[in-house]
Image (cartoon, helix red, strand yellow):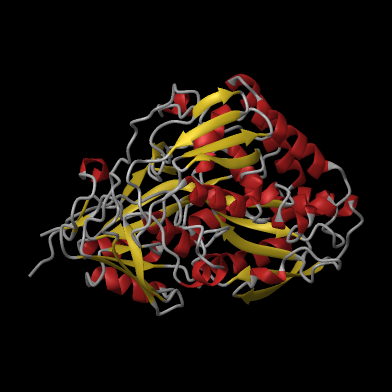
Amino acid sequence: MEQPMKASLSRRTFLAGSAVAAAAAGLSLAGCSGGGDTTSTPSTDAGTTDPGAAAQGGTLTGACAYTSTNVNPIGNSSALMLGATWHVFEGLYDLDLHTYKTYNALAAGDPTKVSDTEYEVALRDGAKFSDGTDVTSADVVNAFEKNMADPTYGAFLEFIDTVSAKDDKTVAFTLKYPFDSLLKGRMSVVKVFPASLTEDDLKTKPIGSGPWMYDTINGDDGGSIEFVPNTNYNGKYAATADKMHWDITLDNTARTTALQEATVQVMESVPDANADQLVAAGATVDYIQGFNQAFLMFNTLKEPFNDKRVRQAFFYAIDADKLINNQMAGHASPVTGFLPKEHANYHEASTVYKRDVEKAKSLLKEAGVENLEFTMVTNNNWVKDLAAQIQEDLKEAGITMKNDEQKINWSEYAESADVLPYDVMLTPGDPTCFGNDPDLLMSWWYGDNIWTQGRTCWKKAGDGKFEELQTLMQTAREATDEKTQQETWNKCFDLLAEEVPLYPLFHRELATGYQAEQITGFEPIATTGLVFLGASVKA
């Protein structure tokens, strides 16, 4: 029997912007002085769920495109486990990943402003962890302190001076400087767990206060994660199924087959070559412009990559438009600034790279570099398909590239007394799973953290540009008006485009596939990871 067409390929716009600039994008301000949106809810049907409502039955199923064995909610940057974290844990405030609005999670309401640098947050009445114990301010303080000490998340939270328990249900924050415009969104980075959990607990099977709890966890390729409802949850977004099951399937063909045959309801990261095939089989494929990007990262302590002219030469030599058209099937946008054009805080950088082989050659000559040979460490995920063209493009500019495709062990790229043993790296990244204000996005790759202390080693470069960026970012953080903040961020974007210690080749649209006949209330997001909050199985 002929298969009816049930859905077509669709494209949706990435809603983005800082709290200060959110109004320009039609988003509610999430201020911390009592004037913010205290009733904002996810764009899914989750807000209609009664507190503590029972599951509606069936099993929610997804096919995930990334692996990880790290379930620890502290400092987690895994696409797989961050997605799991959104379902198992709560912050004081959480982000609706569809709109980037904050909503009250463990917090009963907006922060109460005591002074420009002091705030108090009351906890939701009756909030419990999945083991039945009450969520207390001591648990929140412990979670914040451990995340503040984390080398990854610490950069997001450096504005906090101290966190303390005013009483069992009230948490007091003292900030180092005013941070009104970004406060609630940044607090959402910290997920709360019982202070009694040991390091082993956090690494094996941690518990939270979210609508779901872990049943079994195997984040390796071919493994699966099983979730069951947290029956002690009393928030607004209760689990809407009896179970949730995620298959971890790195192979694109296997993941496509699973959705095509409807053995899963949702598929993460649809390969462009398979989108039409899935639509023909009755699935829906949504493309959403986000901040997911392939980027080049340079070892800025290693000659000749310590010279920005050499780094710039790479971006002039590589034909990004051709990569977009051929390898990405058009589902990406050219880089004209650090942020995609759809972002509310977009600024066209003073340096925009378009292919210019002669310009690349000229820059190499200025830097005194001839017959450059180097090794590209290429992550063995979707970016590996870009390497061959990049190699040919660079060859035309007189650069010889050897491609070393591997599953990158990020622990090898930490701060070291020695120069790290790599030249250039090609890998994807997307910190919008934590939030999307410009300060957070820049803090991820360019803050005083593992990226600049190790990896790019830009902090050690000694040219003063890292320090210049930090000063500009701090000025923007403390800005009290939108105009000053945006103008300062624009200077940051210009500096990054000029220095390119790590910089995107393009901004990718994220493709998610789902069986609309099997699941309702599901909406894809613009970042990696799957969100089933508010989704339920169709009868």
408 relative position to 41: left or right:
right
The residue shown at (70%, 35%) is 473
Residue drawn at 19 percent across, 50 percent down: 53
In the rendered image, the quadrant that contains the N terminus is bottom left
Q: Is residue 225 above or below residue 222?
A: above
Task: Please count the marks in the image.
Answer: 0
- The quarter in which the C terminus is drawn is bottom left
Vertical side of 419 occupied by 117: above or below = above
Does the rendering let one see residue 427? yes
Residue 291 appears in view? no
Residue at the (29%, 74%) spot, across then down = 257
Nearer to us in this view, 346 or 410: 410
The structure residue drawn at horizontal position 65% and vertical position 50%, both measured from the top left corner, is: 154
Which residue of the protein is positioned furthest toward the front in this rendering? 167
Which of 183 and 331 lies nearest the eye of the viewer? 183
Residue 181 x, y percent position in the rendering: 55, 28
Where's residue 410, x and y in %?
A: 65, 68
Whole-percent x and y of residue 199? 56, 68
Viewed as shown, does residue 303 lie left or right of 170?
right
Please identify the quarter of the rendering in which residue 114 is found.
top right
Q: Quadrant location of residue 388?
A: bottom right
On the image, the x and y values in percent for residue 354 come to 65, 45
In the displayed structure, 513 sits above or below 181; it is below
Residue positioned most to the bottom: 222
Comparing 370 with 516, the one in front is 516
Residue 420 vs residue 170, the one in the foreground: 170
Establish if 64 lies above or below 143.
below
Looking at this rendering, what residue extends furthest in the left direction? Answer: 1
